[in-house]
């Protein structure tokens, strides 16, 4: 069974929003600052059950000490948020396979 971010955010309280209704560039900067490990993906790649929207390359960050991931979550007409949520190793590996290697 795969993870679905939309469902998770509706049914769980185990996440933190670091920015809300912000611009994508600001959210990308927050992810780069807060994460201890980064990968970069392309717009349209599926991460945790949603297609990421943003200006490439899109940073996805990991905090290995806390076992969490930072992702930009864009809802058209509502802006972009930075969401931090727990993640397992299987999902981390799926995201790592999407890494473009393009560091910004």
Image: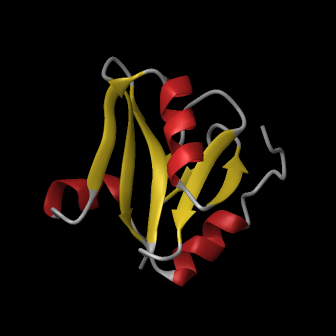
Colour scheme of the picture: secondary structure
Question: Which residue is at 56% across, 25% downward?
Answer: 25
Residue 24, x across and y down, in percent: 51, 26
Classify the position of the N terminus by image quarter: bottom left
Question: Which residue is at 69% across, 56% downward?
Answer: 39
Task: In the displayed orientation, state which residue is furthest to the top.
Answer: 77
User: Across the whole image, how many numbered discs are drawn on residues?
Assistant: 0
Q: Nearer the viewer, residue 81 or 48?
A: 81
Residue 57, x across and y down, in percent: 72, 37
Classify the position of the C terminus by image quarter: top right
Question: Which residue is at 48% across, 33% downward?
Answer: 27
Question: Which residue is at 53% across, 74% downward?
Answer: 64
Residue 49, x across and y down, in percent: 45, 58
Residue 21, x across and y down, in percent: 31, 24
Q: Is residue 37 left or right of residue 16?
A: right
Q: Is residue 83 left or right of residue 23?
A: left
> Which quadrant of the figure has residue 53?
top right
Task: In the displayed orientation, state which residue is furthest to the right.
Answer: 101
Q: Is residue 104 left or right of residue 89?
A: right
Is residue 75 placed above or below 72 in the rendered structure?
Answer: above
Is residue 58 placed above or below 60 in the rendered structure?
Answer: above
> Which quadrant of the figure has residue 10?
bottom left
> Which quadrant of the figure has residue 37?
bottom right
Q: Is residue 46 left or right of residue 39?
A: left
């Amino acid at each position: 069974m795969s993870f679905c971010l939309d469902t998770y955010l509706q049914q769980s309280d185990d996440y933190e929003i670091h920015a809300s209704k912000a611009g994508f560039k600001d959210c990308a900067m927050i992810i780069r600052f807060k994460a201890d490990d980064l990968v970069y993906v392309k717009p349209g790649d599926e991460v945790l059950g949603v297609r990421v929207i943003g200006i490439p390359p899109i940073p996805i960050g990991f905090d290995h000490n806390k076992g969490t991931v930072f992702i930009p979550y864009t809802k058209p007409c509502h802006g972009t948020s930075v969401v931090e949520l727990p993640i397992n190793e299987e999902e981390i590996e799926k995201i790592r396979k999407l890494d473009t290697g393009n560091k910004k």
